[in-house]
Image: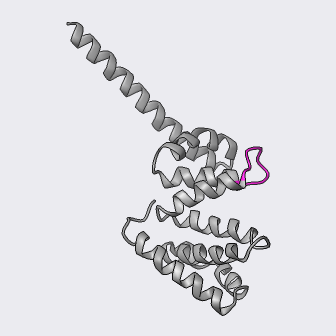
Amino acid sequence: MKLFRLLTIIFVFTFVTLNAQVTDFQRGLEAFNAHKYEKAFKHLVKYARDSNDCVSQYIVGYCYADSSLTIANDSLAEHYLLMASELKYGRAMGLLSVLYFKKQSYDKHWTIMSYVWAELAAYYDPIQSVNSRRQVIKESLDEEEIKKAEAIIAEKKKLLDLIEICM
């Protein structure tokens, strides 16, 4: 009888916990879609940190990248967007490209990486392919830098082609 009670308590606790987590995730998505970014961040940061969920990683990265929010942090934005990008999430790749392009005045490496992620975003996400950012970035690179970017793109495609597109 004690075993039955213990199992019942564990089951109920697990069920309530799982339902609360799903609700938090759904609340985060709803808040993001309603442009309530800090609320979305609050609900999704644990998923972005603790799981391989590309959507929550993208949203958390997006929130960190938004300079109008109190949580703005370029380094953390890059971290979460890179995590989602490496899971083949096109929107994250596109935003990561924008972040890197903003850094271009510091070092040409960032322009190259901006181009890399813009190309990858266009390759894996048809919505990103209509963006003209790739051409603008490419025009700021010389021939040697374009070759370097193309080599990086080829290497990243080898890795990314092995995984499913994250949705």
Tally of numbered tags: 0
Q: Residue at left 67%, top 78%?
A: 133
- Residue 103, picture quadrant: bottom right
Say which quadrant the C terminus sits in: bottom left
Which of 11 and 77 lies nearest the eye of the viewer? Answer: 77
Examine the rendered structure and indicate whether residue 107 appears above or below residue 53. Answer: below
Which of 166 and 36 lies nearest the eye of the viewer? Answer: 166
Query: Which residue sits furthest bottom?
Result: 143
- Residue 137, picture quadrant: bottom right
Which of 160 and 89 lies nearest the eye of the viewer? Answer: 160
Query: Which residue sits furthest left?
Result: 1
Q: Residue at left 70%, top 86%?
A: 141
Query: Which residue sits furthest top?
Result: 1
Say which quadrant the N terminus sits in: top left
Examine the rendered structure and indicate whether residue 90 appears above or below residue 146. Answer: above
37 part of magenta stretch:
no
In the picture, measured across the screen, residue 49 lies left or right of residue 5, that is right
Examine the rendered structure and indicate whether residue 116 appears above or below residue 3. Answer: below
Decide whether the magenta segment is chiefly helix, strand or loop.
loop
Examine the rendered structure and indicate whether residue 126 appears above or below residue 76. Answer: below
Coordinates of residue 99 in the picture (x, y in percent): 69, 65
In the picture, measured across the screen, residue 22 lies left or right of residue 81, that is left
Coordinates of residue 17 in the picture (x, y in percent): 43, 28
67 part of magenta stretch:
yes
Span of residues in magenta: 65-73
Coordinates of residue 40 in the picture (x, y in percent): 62, 43
Coordinates of residue 129 in the picture (x, y in percent): 56, 78
Which of 36 and 68 lies nearest the eye of the viewer? Answer: 68
Q: Residue at left 69%, top 72%?
A: 110
